[in-house]
Image (cartoon, grey):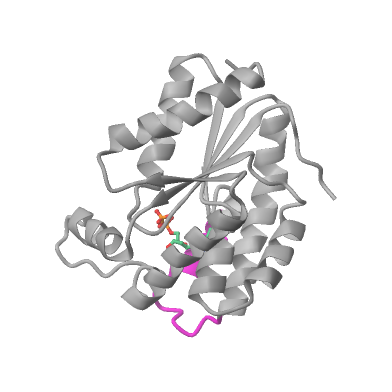
Amino acid sequence: MLKHEKNGLFISIEGPDGAGKTTQARLLKTRLENLGVEVFLTREPGGTPVGEEIRKLLLNPEYSEMTVACEVLLYSAARAQLVRQLINPSLKKGRVVISDRYLDSNIVYQGFGGGESPEIIEKINLWAAGGLMPEITFLLDLDAQTGLKRLQEGDKSGKWQGDRVEQKGLDYHCRVRQGYLELAGRSSGRIVIIEAGGNSDAVHEKIWQLTEPLLRKKNLL
Ligand code: TYD
């Protein structure tokens, strides 16, 4: 089993579709780099050549027949590759790793959303990730309706269809949001809920206020 690499700092950003994770991950990366901190930013599913191939399979709207169990294993397969190929080596070099989604997404989307056992998904993922957990997870919380509306409005073509996950109904996305809140209640030492309805600069400031002390504690800043 891989051990948690203590040298760097591992941060994940989670939240329902449309909550603005990708924007926040980029803002945090830029702020850190401006302060001279080395950062490795990655996204899930994907991040490695193998993982990006798995991502194409997972998000392809043609595969509507894909079972939730199959999704669990594909997402965790991509994660297993990402942890070993890129995240652990970056942490060993003392970098800050920011992951745009990590294993909580699997527990919440396939478990709470898709109806497979969250406990079993957690076990599979812990094995796949070699036990590596983020030191802090920012959960960008937004109601499902607003999240989906943001995605539709952000689409320039005016013919928004969404990927395979985004196409699932509002009910599914409401379960995802509830799942995240439940998980945060259980992992309150690691998962911090950030209200994501406001503007992105305000959300970034909240994230920064919690990140900075962690960096100082680890002598990364
Ligand atoms: P992406 O286009 O990256 O969306 P986002 O910007 O919201 O992260 O697609 C990722 C989708 O995959 C997203 O809808 C959530 C879903 N997902 C899962 O269902 N399970 C998982 O384990 C992960 C990592 C993502």
Residue 23: name its quadrant.
top left
Is residue 37 visible from the viewing direction of this image? yes
Whole-percent x, y for residue 102 in the image = 57, 52
Q: Foreground: 22 or 170?
A: 170
Q: Residue at x 51, y 23 (%)?
A: 212
Q: Foreground: 63 or 4?
A: 4
Considering the image in quadrants, where does the C terminus appear?
A: top right
Name the residue at the right extreme.
Answer: 1
For the magenta stretch, what is the residue range?
A: 52-67
Q: Number of numbered discs present?
A: 0
- In the image, taking residue 80 as reference, residue 170 lies left or right, namely left
Name the residue at the bottom extreme.
Answer: 65
Q: Foreground: 160 or 54?
A: 160
Inspect the magenta stretch and tell me whether residue 158 lies in it: no
Whole-percent x, y for residue 118 in the image = 63, 70
Name the residue at the left extreme.
Answer: 158
Q: Residue at x 71, y 38 (%)?
A: 88
Q: Residue at x 26, y 43 (%)?
A: 198
Whole-percent x, y for residue 26 in the image = 40, 35
Q: Foreground: 199 or 25?
A: 199
Is residue 164 visible from the viewing direction of this image? no
Residue 172: name its quadrant.
bottom left
Inspect the magenta stretch and tell me whether residue 63 lies in it: yes
In this view, 96 is above or below 100 = above
In this view, 123 is above or below 201 = below
Q: Residue at x 21, y 57 (%)?
A: 155
- In the image, taking residue 118 as reference, residue 127 lies left or right, namely right
Whole-percent x, y for residue 61 in the image = 39, 74
- In the image, taking residue 142 as reference, residue 63 lies left or right, namely right
